Image: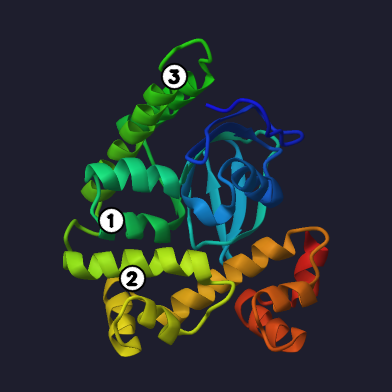
Amino acid sequence: MDKEKKIVADTPEVYYIEDEVVFARIDHRLNADMFYNLLALYLPSNNNTVISFILLESGRMELVIDNEEVSCDAQTNNVVSVGMSKNVSGLACSRNMSGYMLSIGKVFMDKVMKGRKILSISQILSMRKQGGSGRLEGDNKELIKGCLMNVERYLSDEKHLFSSDLARMAVMIFLYENINIALSHGRMVPERMVPDRKEEMVARFMDRLLADIENHRDVAYYADCLCVTPHYLSKVIKSVLGKSAGRIIEEMLIERAVIMLREPECTAQQVADRLHFSDQSSFGKFFKRHMGVSPMQFKRKL
């Protein structure tokens, strides 16, 4: 593991596997900016995060995920998951909040999880869409807490010759156990719910979208890249993800705009130019339709 760079001011100690996994003990200092900074710093950019898990040990947390308020506390909804396509625009914690945060990058999921056929593509995609709060109790809570502590144990052990490999295994066990709990409670799409051919097309679409969203936002472009018609691509995307291809593109575009606007020196005009809007006004209308505030109002809240 690369232990040289990377310091986020005023945060608990952070452990990581380069470009793959980030783990941190969290407390009341966690906020939306810190959350995104951690992901951007340790997983190159927020775009490469598949999902982040937070387990509360004490206190409360209030989040705004995709403009929806989410409340959780250690006694009731003690788990928060934030999927790749979700935007956290607000995060506040009580003074006594404490817990664990584990963020898993696309590199890890693609190389380790999908490569070993642990999950079908449809299940990976369903994890990418997850977001919100849930409840773990009894044995399930202790099991997941134990998995997280094992991740921390191996990531923090700099003397062990195989700490990185053991940490990856610990993350895999954590995911196995979460998947088992989710499947047992019907919270994850069953394996092979859709044909593999459609799953593969959606995965290729998502990969191309992540790479090209700043330059292309029309369905026809992505359909051409996949050698299918726009109508067929939209049909496949809708059948697997439950949303149209156009809607997925808009969500990704907003996510990219939010990341850019979080850069202190980046103006709304620069974001409009980088995302190839015709002018700042059209970008502003698009942003406000999705976020409820103008780009300037969004920046003032940061």
Task: Where is residue 206? Give x, y as percent.
Answer: 40, 66
Assess whether mark 3 and mark 2 are in contact (beta carbons under 8 angstroms).
Answer: no
Marks 2 and 3, Cα distance to the nearest angstrom? Answer: 37 Å
Instruction: List the residue tagged with mark 2.
Output: 241
For image coordinates 52% across by 77% down, the residue present is 250
Instruction: List the residue tagged with mark 1.
Output: 123
Q: Of marks 2 and 3, which one's residue comes earlier in the chain?
A: 3
Relative placement, left or right, of 136 versus 99 is: left
252, above or below 177, in the image: below
Q: Quadrant of residue 277?
A: bottom right
Q: Hey, what amino acid is under mark 2?
A: Leu
Relative placement, left or right, of 263 versus 202 is: right
Task: Where is residue 18? Give x, y as percent.
Answer: 53, 35
For image coordinates 59% across by 52% down, the residue present is 45
Q: Quadrant of residue 213?
A: bottom right
Assess whether mark 3 and mark 1 are in contact (beta carbons under 8 angstroms).
Answer: no
